[in-house]
Image: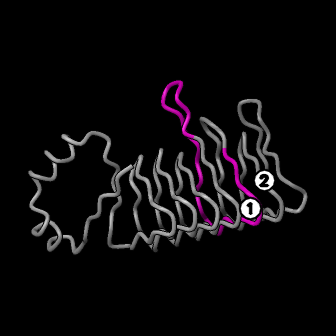
Amino acid sequence: MLIKHRGFEPQVDSSVFVAPNASLIGKVNIGPKSRVMYGAVIDSEGSEIDIGEYSIICENAVIRATASGDVGHPVSIGDHVFISPQTTLIGCTVESYSYIATGATVLQGAKIHKGAIVAVGAFVHAKAAIPSEFFVSSTRVSLARTKKRLWLTLLDQLDLPRLRSMLSLRYMIVYQ
């Protein structure tokens, strides 16, 4: 379903398959030979969404471009990208040849560089940068470091070994 929003209609190449119950809303551009599968929602609520060629957006994925005041958080998905079912992408960039696995979440300002893999259920926090060909496992949370002192203070206050044992998680900080 193609829905006009804020004066913009989705622009979809004629070679793209869009499932009948998928929703493309507003300023959405999809390149040739891509696929948008059943139940996917691609919503340019506050900005724009660009999806490259030969990319696949699987069932029930949610891709949303947002804005904070006048600052837009567009979504950019490169060529040959696979976005698995139940994935959530909000205001982020996923470069070409990347794979975002089932149930993963990528938040505003995060950048997944070329060929990176975000595993099943993994979480990539706002403004995080995942290096090229890097693997983010499902037991990790990737955080951005925006102010060195703030993060060092927070890390000094956390008892990470105790927290890891309580949550059975390992934390990794990815710096921009």
Label 1 Cα neighbours within 10 Å, binned few <14 / some 14-19 / many ≥20: some
Q: Name the residue under label 2.
A: 1
Q: What residue lies at 59% left-to-right and 53% top-to-bottom? A: 63
Q: Is residue 14 left or right of residue 118?
A: right
Q: Give the range drawn in magenta.
A: 49-73
Label 2 Cα neighbours within 10 Å, binned few <14 / some 14-19 / many ≥20: few
State the SS at label 2. loop
Q: Give percent across and percent down for residue 162.
A: 9, 68
Q: Give percent across and percent down for residue 24.
A: 72, 50
Residues at marks 1 and 2 touching, judged by CB atoms closer than 8 Å? yes
Q: Quadrant of residue 166?
A: bottom left
State the SS at label 1. loop
Is the residue 35 above or below the residue 155 in the image?
A: below
Q: What residue lies at 79% left-to-right and 49% top-to-bottom? A: 2
Q: Is residue 158 left or right of residue 91?
A: left
Q: Mark 1 points at which residue?
A: 21
Q: What residue type is labelled 2?
A: Met
Q: What residue type is labelled 1?
A: Asn
Query: Mark 1 and mark 2: span between their CA atoms?
Result: 6 Å
Labels in figure, total: 2
Mark 1 or 2, nearer chain start: 2
Colouring method of the image = one colour
Q: What residue lies at 56% left-to-right and 33% top-to-bottom? A: 72
- Whether residue 164 appears in magenta in the rendering, the answer is no
Query: Which residue is at the front of the view, 127 or 43?
Result: 127
Q: Give percent across and percent down for residue 35.
A: 76, 66
